[in-house]
Image (spheres, helix red, strand yellow):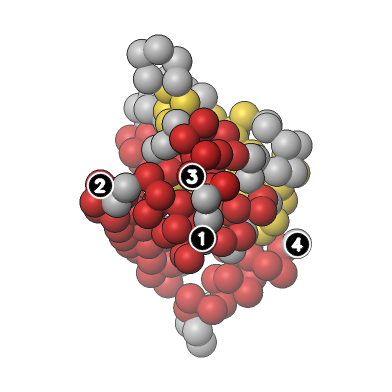
């Protein structure tokens, strides 16, 4: 599985992959079960995860304890609660595995060491931040202007693999649609 992380970093750095073995040694391999909680709101986020296999959900609870999904993150991507990870403050989001996962986790101390000693890793980190920000802004701006039916069509066009991998309840939460409305509209497509 470490090959997946090696290829991911090499693809981003091109020929600048000096110190790659040292970088890879900073990550620990984690296997999770389905629905395993990696971070709970109020805890300090201690890791940035690279998803080699599987799917993670980033979500929050409202005052009535309803779950709202901010993002679904699949293979070959990074996941963390970056504000908490960077500041050491309590997390405002939760992270759990939706499927059994193969993850590579790096803790804050190791991450900071890499940022200071491996200059090209800074480039990877900036790419992670930019991709996360762009994805969040795009999804938020897109969903604000779309009807519930248009959101479902958007998902089918841009992230179709989620339709077969996730429960209707989770997809509805991701799209910001009531579960019953999602089922009714999906049947019309």
Mark 2 to mark 3: distance in Å?
18 Å
Mark 2 surroundings: few (<14), some (14-19) or many (≥20) residues within 10 A:
few
Q: First in sequence: mark 2 or mark 3?
A: 2
Left or right: 75 as drawn, with respect to 147:
right
Answer whether residue 155 is visible to the viewer in this image. yes
The picture places residue 20, in percent across and down from the top left corner, at 59, 71
Give the residue displayed 64% in from the left and 70% down from the top: 6
In x, y percent, where is residue 19?
A: 56, 72
Q: Earlier in the sequence, mark 3 or mark 4?
A: 4
Q: Which mark is residue 156?
A: 1
**Residue under the image location 39 percent in, 38 percent down:** 176
Residue 18 located left or right of residue 64 = right
Residue marked by disc 4: 1
Residue under circle 3?
185
Of tags 3 and 1, the one toward the viewer is: 3
Image quadrant occupied by the N terminus:
bottom right
Q: CA distance from mark 2 to mark 4?
A: 38 Å
The mark lying in front, picked from 1 and 4, is: 1
Q: Earlier in the sequence, mark 2 or mark 4?
A: 4
In the image, is residue 5 above or below residue 65? below
| C-alpha gap between disc 1 and disc 4 | 29 Å
Q: Position of residue 130 (x, y in %)?
A: 33, 61
Mark 3 to mark 4 CA distance (whole Å):
39 Å
First of labels 1, 4 by sequence position: 4
Q: Earlier in the sequence, mark 1 or mark 2?
A: 2
| Residue that carries the numbered disc 2 in the rendered image | 144
- The first of marks 3 and 1 along the sequence is 1
């Amino acid at each position: 599985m470490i090959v997946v992380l090696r290829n991911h970093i090499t693809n981003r750095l091109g020929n600048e992959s000096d110190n790659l073995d040292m970088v890879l040694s900073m990550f620990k391999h984690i296997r999770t079960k389905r629905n395993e909680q990696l971070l709970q709101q109020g805890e300090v986020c201690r890791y940035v995860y690279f998803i080699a296999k599987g799917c993670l959900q980033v979500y929050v609870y409202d005052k009535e304890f309803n779950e709202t999904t901010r993002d679904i993150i699949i293979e070959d991507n990074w996941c963390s609660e970056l504000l908490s990870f960077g500041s050491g403050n309590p997390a405002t989001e939760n992270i759990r595995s939706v499927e059994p996962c193969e993850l590579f986790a790096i803790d804050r101390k190791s991450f900071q060491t890499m940022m200071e000693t491996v200059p090209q890793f800074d480039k990877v980190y900036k790419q992670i931040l930019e991709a996360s920000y762009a994805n969040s802004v795009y999804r938020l701006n897109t969903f604000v202007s779309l009807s519930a039916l248009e959101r479902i069509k958007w998902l089918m066009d841009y992230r179709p693999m989620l339709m077969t991998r996730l429960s209707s309840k989770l997809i509805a939460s991701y799209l910001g649609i009531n579960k019953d409305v999602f089922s009714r509209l999906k049947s019309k497509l």
